[in-house]
C-alpha cells in the first residue's frame, strides 16, 4: 500500500497565495461587475526590458538553425550568464565568488524551497515571524518540524519575531539553531537589515556552526547606500552563508523564470563520520540530478540585463515600481494608516486600522473597495494586525487603489 508523506498533513490546506486567489475568484464570481485591483501577490505588471526581448528573439532564431541549435545545456547555467552575474553582482563589488559557486535556476522560490534537502532532517531551523511562507512550509514537508499548535506556531521551530517594536530587525535566538533563514530586503515587511545587524548574524552563525540562507531576491530595490546588497559584503559570510537572487523582481521574470543561488565552497556541514562536506558539492549533485537547466532562451534574456543598456532599462523598471511604493506609502499616511517598508523594497507593510484582524481587513478591502492585498497573519502570527500591499501594480491601478482607500473607506 502506498502511504503518504505524513508531514503534509501538518500544513495549512493551501499555500497562502492560492488561498487568496481562491477567495478573490469566489468574490468575482458572485460580483462579476467588481473592478478588482490586485496588489496581493508580488507579481510584476510591466513588460520585460527591451534588451531581454531582443536577446530572446535572437536566441529563438538560433534554435531554428541546426548550426546554432542547442539541446541540454549545463545544469548549472551557461557560462555567459554565470560570468555576467559574477562580474556585475560580485567581482565589481569587491566580492570574490568563483564561477562554479553560482547555480542558475528557474527562480528563488524553487531554490529557497529546495535547499533544505541538502541539510540533515535533524537540523533545527530559525525563521523570522512574519516570513515568506516557502521557507517554513518546505521544512514542514521535510519533517523538520512538529505539529502546528493553536497559537499558529509549529513545534520545533525557532521563531524570530520581527515587529515594529524591534524595527523589524529580529534578535538572535537564545540558544543554538543549525539553519537561519533571512530575507533582505524583506518579504513581507519591506524593511531591511543594517550591516551591523547582519554582522551579528554572521558572527552567530560562525560561533554556532550554523548556516544562513540569505534570500536577496529584492536586492535591486535597495535605494539607501548603507544597506548591504549581498550578505558577502559582511566579513566572514562566505564561510557561513548561501545567497539566493532572482531576475523575477529585478527584471520582470516572474513568468519567464530565472534566478540563481551562490554557495561558496567554504560553507560546509558535518557528515556522520565527522568530516566536513561542502554544501556546494551537495547542491551540485542535487541540481544535476533533479534539474536540467534553465532554458537557453531565458538565460540569454537574463544575461542581457547586464549590458549598459540593460542596466539602464532595469533601473527604469525598478524606479517605476518604487514610485508606486512612494504613492502607496504617502497615500496610506494621508489616510491615517501607519505603514512600513517601501523605501528599499517593493512591499508596504501596514498596520490595520483599529487593530482589525488581518483577514477581516482583507475582506473589508475586497468587498468595500475591491482591492486585493495580503493578510499579514498569512506570513506568521506576528503578522496579525498587519497587511501587505505590493507596488508591482501598474501606475493607474496604484493611483486608483490609493484613491479608493483614502476616499471611500472610513475607519
Ligand atoms: C510574494 O507575493 O510574496 C511573492 O510573489 C512571492 C514569490 O516571489 O514567490
Image: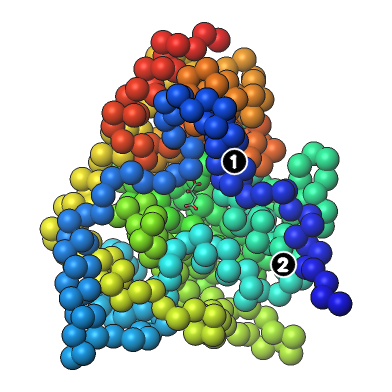
List x then y, in percent, for residue 207. Answer: 63, 66
**CB under 8 Å between callouts 1 and 2?**
no
Q: Is residue 349 above or below residue 146?
A: above
Q: Position of residue 351 (x, y in %)?
A: 56, 25
Residue at x 66% of width, y 49% of height: 14
In the image, taking residue 86 as reference, residue 160 lies left or right, namely right
Q: Which residue is mark 2?
A: 142
Q: Position of residue 155 (x, y in %)?
A: 81, 53
**Total number of numbered discs in the rendering:** 2
Circle nearer the viewer, 1 or 2: 1
Q: Earlier in the sequence, mark 1 or mark 2?
A: 1
The circle drawn on residue 22 is 1
Secondary structure of the residue carrying tag 2 is: loop
Graded by Cα atoms within 10 Å as few (under 14), some (14 to 19) or many (20 or more), the crowding at tag 2 reads: some
Asked if residue 207 shows in the view, the reply is: no
Q: Tell me if the residue at label 2 has its CB under 8 Å from ligand 1.
A: no
User: What is the secondary structure assignment of the residue under circle 1?
Assistant: helix
- Give me the residue at 37% from left, 17% from top: 403
Query: Is 86 situated above or below 346?
Result: below
- Is 291 on the left or on the right of 407, as rendered? right
Q: Position of residue 354 (x, y in %)?
A: 62, 15
Residue in the foreground of this view, choosing between 395 and 337 = 395
Amino acid at each position: 500500500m502506498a502511504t503518504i508523506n505524513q508531514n503534509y498533513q501538518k500544513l495549512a490546506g493551501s499555500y497562502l497565495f492560492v488561498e487568496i486567489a481562491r477567495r478573490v475568484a469566489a468574490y468575482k464570481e458572485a460580483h462579476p461587475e467588481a473592478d478588482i485591483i490586485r496588489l496581493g501577490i508580488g507579481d510584476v505588471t510591466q513588460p520585460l526590458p527591451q534588451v531581454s526581448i531582443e536577446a530572446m528573439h535572437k536566441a529563438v532564431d538560433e534554435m531554428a538553425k541546426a548550426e546554432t541549435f542547442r539541446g541540454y545545456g549545463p545544469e548549472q547555467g551557461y557560462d555567459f550568464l554565470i560570468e555576467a552575474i559574477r562580474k556585475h553582482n560580485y567581482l565589481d563589488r569587491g566580492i570574490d565568488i568563483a564561477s562554479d559557486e553560482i547555480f542558475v535556476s528557474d527562480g528563488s522560490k524553487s531554490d529557497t524551497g529546495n535547499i533544505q534537502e541538502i541539510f540533515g532532517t535533524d537540523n533545527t531551523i530559525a525563521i523570522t515571524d512574519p516570513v515568506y511562507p516557502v521557507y517554513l512550509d518546505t521544512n514542514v514537508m521535510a519533517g523538520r518540524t512538529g505539529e502546528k499548535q493553536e497559537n499558529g506556531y509549529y513545534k520545533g521551530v525557532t521563531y524570530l519575531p520581527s515587529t515594529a517594536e524591534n524595527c523589524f530587525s529580529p534578535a538572535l535566538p537564545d540558544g543554538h539553531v543549525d539553519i537561519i533563514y533571512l530575507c533582505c530586503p524583506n518579504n513581507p515587511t519591506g524593511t531591511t537589515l543594517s550591516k551591523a545587524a547582519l554582522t551579528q548574524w554572521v558572527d552567530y552563525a560562525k560561533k554556532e556552526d550554523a548556516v544562513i540562507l540569505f534570500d536577496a531576491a529584492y536586492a535591486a530595490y535597495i535605494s539607501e547606500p548603507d544597506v548591504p546588497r549581498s550578505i558577502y559584503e559582511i566579513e566572514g559570510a562566505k564561510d557561513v552563508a548561501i545567497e539566493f537572487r532572482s531576475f523575477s523582481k529585478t527584471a520582470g521574470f516572474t513568468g519567464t523564470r530565472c534566478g540563481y543561488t551562490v554557495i561558496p565552497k567554504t560553507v560546509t556541514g558535518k557528515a556522520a563520520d565527522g568530516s566536513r562536506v561542502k554544501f556546494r558539492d551537495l547542491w551540485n549533485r542535487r541540481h544535476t540530478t533533479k534539474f536540467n537547466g534553465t532554458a537557453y532562451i531565458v538565460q540569454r534574456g537574463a544575461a542581457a540585463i547586464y549590458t549598459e543598456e540593460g542596466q539602464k532599462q532595469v533601473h527604469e523598471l525598478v524606479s517605476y515600481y518604487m514610485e508606486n511604493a512612494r504613492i502607496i506609502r504617502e497615500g496610506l499616511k494621508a489616510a491615517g494608516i501607519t505603514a512600513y517598508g517601501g523605501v528599499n523594497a517593493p512591499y508596504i507593510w501596514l498596520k490595520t486600522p483599529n487593530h482589525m484582524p488581518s483577514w477581516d481587513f482583507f475582506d473589508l478591502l475586497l468587498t468595500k473597495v475591491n482591492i486585493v492585498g495580503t493578510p499579514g497573519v498569512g506570513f506568521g502570527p506576528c503578522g496579525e494586525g498587519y497587511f501587505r500591499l505590493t507596488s508591482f501594480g501598474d501606475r493607474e491601478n496604484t493611483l486608483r487603489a490609493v484613491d479608493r482607500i483614502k476616499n471611500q473607506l472610513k475607519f
